Amino acid sequence: MLTLATLFTLIAFASADVCDTTHPITHDETTCGENGICRIEKIEDIFFTPETKTACLQIVSKKNVISKLKLTVAHNYRKCQKGPILFTKNVTVHADSAKRCHGMSECIDRKCLDIGPNSKLVEFQEGNKYPGHTYCASSCGGLWCKCLLPTPACLFYRTYAVPTTDEKFQIYHCDSWSNSINFQAVLTVNNEELERVFIVQEGEEYKIDYKLVKGEHITIKVKLLSITQETGLSILGKKFIQNGDKIALASISNEIFPLECSETGECNYRETCNCQTAESEALCNCPVPDLYKILDDKHHNLPVITERYHLAAGQDNVPTIRSKHNKLHAQIVIDQSYHTSTIESKIDCSISQTTPYVGCYNCLKGASQNVTCKSSEPTHAKLSCDNNDFIDILTCDKNGIVNEIHRKFNGSTPTGVCTVVCGNKNNSYKIEGKLTYVAHTSLTNKTRSLQAMSKRPNPNLAEEINSEAKRQAIAWQVQKMTTVAARELNRIPKPLPTCKFCGLDHHARDCMNFSKAEKRSKAEELNMCIICLNAHNHHPAKCRTLRNQSELCTARVCGDNYTIHHQSLCDNEHQAPSQAPPQAPRPTPQKVRPSEKRNEEKTLEERLLEI
């Protein structure tokens, strides 16, 4: 059982006794013994709803209110029950690369087949100090790639995480949330008021034990039997990041952290990089969350305050949600011993002033009036209205204490008579007032709607879910098709490039203002790549046009001379296959020497490597 605070306060003035529900407990003479001590044991089940937050229990006799307990629901508390905790550190991720030609360092024999994530290569002396992964990929060899042998080389690269500090962060979900209620209890007995604030978890109880004079005592047990949880709180499934007393929500619930550590400090590396290998290095994109930045971000760190809840760190640095209560069932056990002398009030009092009731009828808030009670010395008086249909307690003293009385009525003009009993005097006054009707908080409408809902047949939940899922899927698909169509209609046509030969708007390969020989001469003069007809800012072996061999010259003479260039620069006859008429006779195959056949089967890449 959790207890945030216990407060004992003697109050010398009357506060507003707002009771949404009242449970009177009548004194029975048969419970009194020969020594003049009476005892009452009573169990009351109290059902709180969002509209009823205060319940009052009163032990009353014909002429006095022996004791009164006002129990108010302040807040609903939910405490995070942590799931598996991942420990991590704030890190920066690095990627180092090293290219080795065939026969050098580890690039021998089976090459990359012998390299694994845990391999420690001499090329990465700094990276080997930290948790990381080692990789190997094939790279180009030969003279153009600065290697003697024309066999593929090895590209080694390693990604690793370097901690910025030694502080450990906790990453966790909440497997469940414990449910508890924050109660405020005010006990009025023997002209004194005792106030306590406490928290009770679901299934547990809290005990109030108050000893009075002459062997009198009162024991109250508040047991929380059940709580109906509020649904639809997405915050319950969030991931948390914590460092000491600082807690924040993880911005992305499926975020991957590069370093996963145990509580003892042993850390393993988890890959977060996306790497693309080039000729001599690996180009890696390694997204890494800055944990300190997340903790200091006002949009993610705790407390988080919304209209429905308040999420903050509790006293033990655990995420706790405070919200309004929904529905709950509490059981109150009262065990009180009191003297027969308390059955009757001995101090006379008088009602000096009353005000008409103001407020609303058929509503949740109800109406209120002020009753001023005077007496020669501090005491309490019993207020009963409409033949004990409504009972409350008044506080009186010689200066006159204003008591605020709250009731709920079904009509706009409340009527009736109230009697105040204290000592040997009875005071009566008429109930007056003019109340308004508030439609949106009408108790009658709410009751009728609840009754109508209870009579409806239970729907097939599975069918409703499937129907709603189909509707949303169709709506999403239509929206996606509409978006794609609108994007295509609004797309601006891409302008033609400027020809580097004549300056007009067309591709250089399509230029007809110069002959092929003139274009070849201009390409060399402008330092253009003769393979793709673009700026000569790349190695010929890396020209992308090599992948599209339909644009390259296929003349036999050019191939034998190992001159690779764009077909628009060559006057030689190309060997492109042509469609022969169906009736043309099939040519007689000629014998080809093995050496000539091997030369014809060589690919462009092999020819480039031989240059």
Image (cartoon, helix red, strand yellow):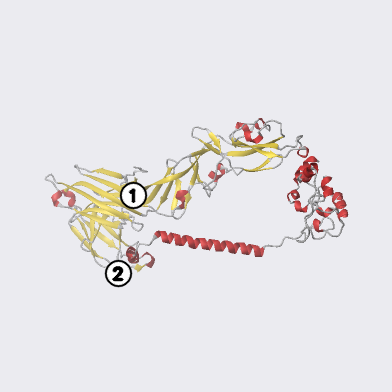
Residue 375 circle label: none
Which quadrant, please, contains the C terminus? top right
Q: Is residue 396 visible?
A: no
Kind of element beneath mark 2: loop
Q: Nearer the viewer, residue 214 or 81?
A: 81
Q: CA distance from mark 1 to mark 2?
A: 33 Å
Placement of 475 over or under 232, stated as above or below: below
Q: Which residue is mark 1?
A: 184
Using the image, determine if residue 489 lies above or below residue 222: below
Classify mark 2: residues with Cα within 10 Å, few (<14), some (14-19) or many (20+): some
Q: Nearer the viewer, residue 415 or 149?
A: 149
Q: Which residue in the structure is indicated by mark 2? A: 413
Q: Amino acid at mark 2?
A: Thr
SS label for mark 1? strand
Considering only vertical position in the picture, is 226 above or below 408?
A: above
Residue 76 image offset from top left, x and y in percent: 38, 50
The location of residue 556, given as percent across then percent down, is: 82, 49
Residue found at x 24% / y 48%: 334
Instruction: Tell which of 53 and 205 is nearer to you.
Output: 205
Q: Count neighbours of disc 1 (C-alpha within 10 A) and say few if under 14, some if 14 to 19, many if 20 or more.
A: some
Q: Quadrant of the N terminus?
A: top left
Q: Mark 1 or 2 closer to N-term?
A: 1
* Residue at 31% from the left image edge and 52% from the top image edge: 329
Q: Residue furthest left?
A: 34
Q: Position of residue 72 (x, y in %)?
A: 33, 52
Residue at image coords 50%, 35%: 262
Left or right? Give the position of 66 relative to 455. Answer: left
